[in-house]
Image (tube, rainbow, N blue to C red):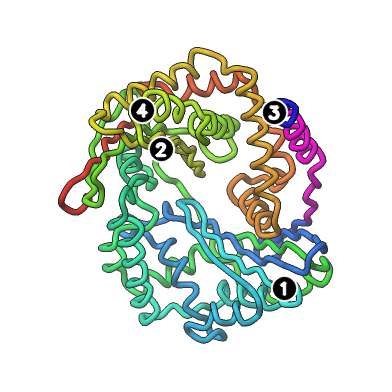
Amino acid sequence: MINKLKLAAGALLLSAVGFAQEVEYTEYDLDNGLHVILHQDNSAPVVTTSVMYHVGGKDREDGRTGFAHFFEHLLFEGTENIERGKWFEIVSSHGGNNNASTSQDRTYYYETFPSNNLELGLWMESERMMHPVIGQEGVDTQNEVVKEERRMRYDNSPYGNLLYAVQKNMFEKHPYKDPNVGYMEDLDAAKLDEFQAYFEKYYVPNNAVLVVAGDIDVKETKEMIEDYFAPIEAGAEVTRNYPKEEPITEAVHAEFFDSNIQIPMAITGYRTPEFGNKDSYVLNMISTYLSDGKSSKLYKKLVDEQNIALQVGAFNLEQEDYGMYLVYSLPQGETSLDSINTEIEEEIAKLRNELISESDFEKLQNKAENSFVNSNSSIAGIANSLARNYLLYDNTSLINKEIDIYRNITREDIKEVANKYLKPNQRVIVDYLPEKKEAE
């Protein structure tokens, strides 16, 4: 009976994925270089207006880290026509919600409103792009906000610097070596004119994509976009020429100390390919195979069977220039970090030397397809996917075609990619250790 239920559930999933509705969209450029993507879905009276800027933590001068993350906060301060401190009040009073996020490669802003407030969303994002108020008062205020965020999320949070501990040891030249949030001494030292120059360089229409998704009329929306965004002047073309890293050919061993923890953590990192590379999709599947859920290989081995770990996880961090594949674990009792690392390497070696089973591979494909469907199950999710696929992957059509990439991955691909990127001599091994003083 249980097997029949499993088969039925699998059939339903495959059916849902197989007949998932294709996301239709229209895309074009304004004269000022702003790329526009429109997705019409009139099934619910909701609309998401979003702008993704091609600027992230890596876009900085030496000694001036953290600017992009700082601007994520600063550009909510107000504009010439939106009073300081009123941004969130305007959104909530019109039945909307909004947020923003910054990675090493991009910054994303969005508002989701009842569709009768589409024009409001467009006006607010055009205000942010056209004439935000970047003054000393706002800079000082947000500097304190960012400091508090850094304390809460990183410096005073157990394992909060996990990612940074790997970055600083995986990259020597590329700006990925520094944390996305930056160093507070850099922000403290920056002058107002430096912030203003940063805005003028990166937050320009020709370095951004505008996405409007939901209950819209395409013709009317195009007219509103023309009214609000066409008058914004283009900026100079943004050019990037970040230094390349040499391949890691000999394992790197490092220590990182965190005063907020009592249990050490074993971390193994591998440098992996950039956004859009098929190998990166394969690594996503490997991550699922090793650590997604209690039935995953590493969890069953380290936590259930051997009882040498409290927790184990893995993830593939996809980025524009280089990715990072991380495996981490908290040891149980007196278990050493070296023994944890040995067991993890043993499991990864199986991927390099053997094909995974047909049944495990089928589960991986089902999970990948389910994840794809879920990512595009909401208007806000579709808007995010459209923006990301255009700006970072240079391929808007991935919103419909990405699932085919996963479907075409084979067991042989998994073995090949494991041999290409996950060899012992390519590792960055970080012993993340307790210490009674502040983290480095």
Mark 2 and mark 1: span between their CA atoms? 46 Å
Instruction: Tell which circle, 4 or 2, labels the residue nearer the N-terminal end.
Output: 2
In this rendering, is residue 371 above or below 230?
above
Question: Which residue is disc 2 drawn over?
Answer: 244
The amino acid type found where label 2 is placed reads: Lys
Q: Amino acid at mark 1?
A: Pro
Reading the chain from its start, which is encountered first: label 2 or label 1?
1
Q: Earlier in the sequence, mark 3 or mark 1?
A: 3
Q: Relative to the observer, which residue lies in front, 213 or 107? A: 213
Predominant SS along the magenta part? helix
Which contiguous range is marked in magenta? Answer: 7-25
Image disc number at residue 2: 3
Q: Secondary structure at mark 2?
A: loop
- In which quarter of the view is residue 355 placed? top right
Q: Residue at x 41, y 34 (%)?
A: 327
Residue 1 placed where, x, y %?
73, 27
Q: Nearer the viewer, residue 8 or 171?
A: 8
Q: CA distance from mark 1 to mark 4?
A: 51 Å
Residue 363 quadrant? top right
> Do callouts 1 and 4 mark residues in contact (Cβ within 8 Å)?
no
Give the spatial CA distance, label 4 vs label 3.
Answer: 29 Å
Is 402 above or below relative to 362?
Answer: below
Please determine whether, in this image, residue 63 is positioned above or below residue 6: below
Instruction: Tell me residue 434's x, y (percent).
Output: 21, 44
Dot 1 alpha-carbon crowd within 10 angstroms: few under 14, some 14 to 19, many 20 or more: some
Circle 4 packing at 10 Å, graded few (<14), some (14-19), many (20+), is some
